[in-house]
Amino acid sequence: MCSPALMSLWDAEGYLNFHQNDPLARVYYKKLRKIQEIYIPLIIDGNNVQCNSQTGSGKTAAYLIPLIKKCKDAVFDVKPFPSGPNTPFEIIICPTRSDISFGRNYGQMNVEVSVAVLSEHVHILVTTPGRFQYSNFKLVFRHLKFRVFDDATELFTTNFKDIDLKIYENDLNDNDTFRILCFSGSDGYDEVFQEIAKNCPRVTIQQIVAVNSNIVQTFVNLDYNQRMLHIMDLLKDKSHHKKGTKCIIFTNSIEESELFGMVLMNFEFSAAPFSSIRSQEIRDNTIKEFQGDRLDIIVTTDVCARGMDVKCVDLVINLSLPKSFNTYVHQVGRCGLIRAGKAISFVNLKIDAGLIREIY
């Protein structure tokens, strides 16, 4: 039984029931997924939550829908949230800039622009760890209600593990009403979650991290030097890739992404490389073109495996298998979100046998 506060959000059939002028209604978000049915009531009811679920299962909407509702209720309440400059209601921390598309606050964004964003009456602040720490001295957390760690495994266990989780602890000493929400496509951050949520009630639901069943996986044992030619043959084959459909090719290095992206462009494929050596403006434009109809193929590292908002990817190609199962799940999970997808991975059986067994 869901929270009474949430009953008006969807009908008996599980379809969202928003006023026609509500932003969520305008983007045609109609039916809840299973993970959203579980977590939306938990967040509305004020729980700290930890969620590990596969890529494409609907985690982002599982926290954004209740956060938007809580924020709107607080702003328009009889005793409204004390909105003011540098005083967010909610903070969402993402590991990379690619995960951020609204209310941006990240590196390579002009610092003066970033400060101006914070100086406005920001209710929901979405930020990366680096710019968050830089901006911290300008923020007021006494009225903070939610801290969200999106892709918590990446934030807490890789190159972001040195994020200072206590950076605003002093401001929160008098605030015992904020909640912590951790969402990830994989596990491995339990100790950190227990540390930041200690002495707080919390709900943890673990789901098996696996490849989306809507994806057909194929492994091709082929010498590395022959793979690029084989990929071009695949892209010309309409049974794998029709003109106008979307394809992401993953590589294990920036150099490979740049090289193979340029090769495809020279052979007049609708393609572009996407890597960290390119300016943020170029990367933003590449994503916009890929989301639209101007670009069909991007060649990238695993930076695009997490958080990129492109729903209609039909084909994922791995030039080589990544180093870990979790990364593989994220990569192939870019396809099959709306309709059936294909994932083709080139392998060296002598090197990749262990990971292939883990995948199956």
Image (tube, rainbow, N blue to C red):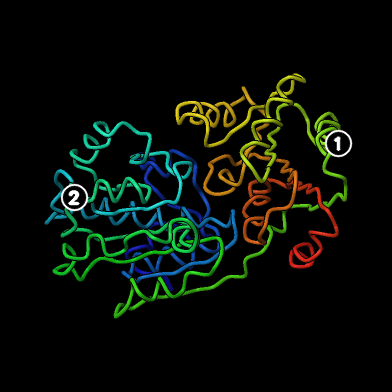
Residue at (23% x, 43% y) in the render:
122
Residue 213 or residue 7, whichever sits in front: 213
Residue at (86% x, 32% y) in the render:
233
- Residue 173 vertical placement versus 213 (above, below): below
Q: Is residue 77 left or right of residue 208?
A: left
Q: Mark 2 sits on what residue? A: 137
Residue 7 or residue 208, whichever sits in front: 208
Q: Position of residue 289 (x, y in %)?
A: 57, 26
Q: Secondary structure at mark 2?
A: helix
Q: Residue type at mark 1?
A: His
Residue 24 or residue 20, whichever sits in front: 24
Q: Is residue 5 left or right of residue 40?
A: left
Numbered mark located on residue 179 in the image: none
Answer with the quarter of the image where residue 296 lies. top right
- Of the 4 image quadrants, the one containing the N terminus is bottom left
Numbered mark located on residue 230 in the image: 1
Q: Position of residue 27 (x, y in %)?
A: 46, 39
* Distance in Å between CA atoms under marks 2 and 1: 53 Å
Q: Position of residue 349 (x, y in %)?
A: 85, 58
Q: Is residue 119 left or right of residue 191?
A: left
Residue at (69% x, 46% y) in the render:
339
Q: Residue type at mark 2?
A: Phe
Q: Is residue 327 left or right of residue 150?
A: right
- Residue 222 vertical placement versus 188 (above, below): above
- Of the 4 image quadrants, the one containing the C terminus is bottom right
Label 1 crowd (10 A; few <14 / some 14-19 / many >=20): few
Q: Position of residue 230 (x, y in %)?
A: 86, 36
Answer with the quarter of the image where residue 249 lies. top right
- Residue 294 vertical placement versus 139 (above, below): above
